[in-house]
Image (cartoon, grey):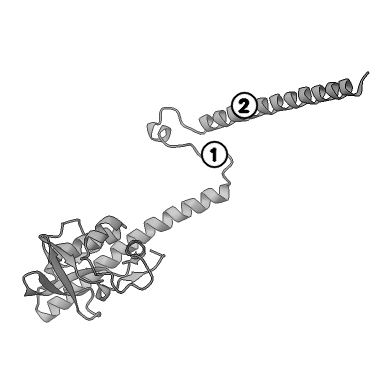
Amino acid sequence: MKPRNVLAIILAGLCIALGAGVAARQRDLIGLRAEEVRLRSSTQKPGDASEASSPPVSQDVPTELLRLRNQVTQLTVRRRELDGIRAENARLKVASTASNNGTASVQNYVTQQNARMVGYDTPAHTLETFLCALRNRDVTNLGVAFAPGAFAHIGGQTIDEALRSMNGRAIPGFSVIDSRAPADDLAELTIQTLPEIPQTTLRFRQLDGQWKLAEIPWGLGLTFSADR
């Protein structure tokens, strides 16, 4: 037999062997996928619409990982509860101080926990909307709350990076102590966050009928960090 014929026979044999191997691998893969579907189906309670709408937990997820996820969820809930308690404690402190001083400045005290999206028609509303956006990490409305040029001195960050890294957890809330209008399109609010923290003045600028923060409100205790 000629060497060329021998080589052709050997190559044909190799092709047949490789084809058989590929076919076997495909059968194994199909079997594994079918087993995965069966296991997922067995972990889902029949008739439960809420569970049917969410992806089932894979059997391959380690128990330790599931435990850690559960702990993270519990800690997140606990942190939110503590933020609410801290805000209420701040409100009570301000109320107690105002009562002792015979003032009524705490009637408009807004906690960060209860801050709402109330628009930008007044400086106080803009500040409340800012706190609400800060609590919800709403970068879009955080940006809307500021006038152009407010981020002129943020040092090395873009405006988007600065907005995303804003950390306002130290801000329990605010109470407006006094308001002034140096010009038709300018306003100043003297606010207080806690009785033990000095009052601070925030400046606002009116643009197209909306009041915007003219500068970063450092006096509120705002910081920039990745840990929010």
Q: x and y percent of residue 69 in the render?
A: 49, 51
Residue in view at x 17 percent, y 63 percent: 126
Dot 2 alpha-carbon crowd within 10 angstroms: few under 14, some 14 to 19, many 20 or more? few
Q: Residue furthest top?
A: 1
Is residue 138 among the parts visible in the rendering? Answer: no
Image quarter (top left, top right, bottom left or bottom right) of the N terminus: top right
Q: x and y percent of residue 52 in the render?
A: 42, 32
Check disc 1 and report the residue beneath it.
58
Residue in view at x 11 percent, y 63 percent: 122
- Closer to the N terminus: mark 1 or mark 2? 2
Dot 1 alpha-carbon crowd within 10 angstroms: few under 14, some 14 to 19, many 20 or more? few
Check disc 2 and report the residue beneath it.
30
Q: In the rendering, which numbered label is found on residue 140? A: none
Kind of residue sitting beneath label 2: Ile
121 vs 100: above or below: above
Residue in view at x 14 percent, y 68 percent: 205
